[in-house]
Amino acid sequence: MNWHFAVSVAARSAPVHHVRIVSRLVFTENGHKPFDDPAKMHRLRRSFAKTWRNARWRDMLLAFLHWLAEGRNSLSVPVSSEEGIVLGLPPMSWQVPVSLPVEDEAPEPDDDDPSDDDEPDEADGPSTADGPEEAGDDA
């Protein structure tokens, strides 16, 4: 199984003109074709990236945009044969003076290998090792 960083992009006109870029994960069996089962893809996204924090997502997005722009400080995205949208890089960022109290604890290590997840594949059938799933639990 392979994981791939992907983005979804949408142009917005309100409250100001901007482009919204959202990071995604896509899983493939052979490195090319995404899994057909949306439920399996959802489960993999939830379990695989559960320890990833905002800094990791931000760094992957910034690295992707840097690569896509070939190191330049802007990225021209064609919208027709003669027109393009020019995006300034790096994207805007904000500092928010609000935080949550955090206990002194070591951060959990990122786990890049979904093959050792506790969740069985659908072909393996349901697992009863942890008992029945409670109502409201994410699958």
Image (cartoon, rainbow, N blue to C red):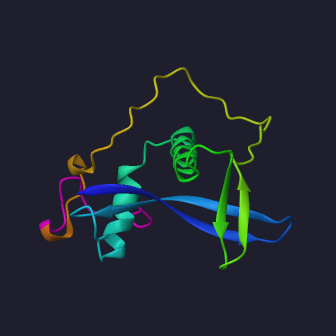
Quadrant of the rendered structure where residue 21 is? bottom right
Residue 132 magenta-drawn?
yes
Q: Is residue 73 above or below residue 87?
A: above
Q: In this view, does 64 lie above or below 22?
A: above
Q: Considering depth in this image, is 101 or 50 the residue closer to the camera?
A: 50
* Dominant secondary structure (helix, strand or loop) of the stretch shown in magenta: loop
- Residue 19 lies left or right of residue 133; in this view the side is right
The span shown in magenta is 124-139
Residue 43 in view in this figure = yes
Q: Considering depth in this image, is 22 or 63 the residue closer to the camera?
A: 63
The residue at the point 67 percent across, 79 percent down is 80
Q: Considering depth in this image, is 125 or 65 the residue closer to the camera?
A: 65
Residue 37 magenta-drawn?
no
Residue 30 percent location from the top left of the image: 21, 63
The residue at the point 42 percent across, 48 percent down is 50
Give the mark count: 0
* In the image, farthest residue toward the right: 15
* In the image, farthest residue toward the top: 104
The residue at the point 54 percent across, 53 percent down is 68
- Residue 125 lies left or right of residue 93; in this view the side is left
Quadrant of the rendered structure where residue 13 is? bottom right
Residue 134 in view in this figure = no
Residue 71 percent location from the top left of the image: 58, 43
Q: Considering depth in this image, is 87 or 30 the residue closer to the camera?
A: 87
The residue at the point 39 percent across, 58 percent down is 45
Q: In which quarter of the image is the N terminus?
A: bottom left
Residue 137 percent location from the top left of the image: 41, 62
- Residue 47 lies left or right of residue 105; in this view the side is left
Residue 139 percent location from the top left of the image: 36, 64
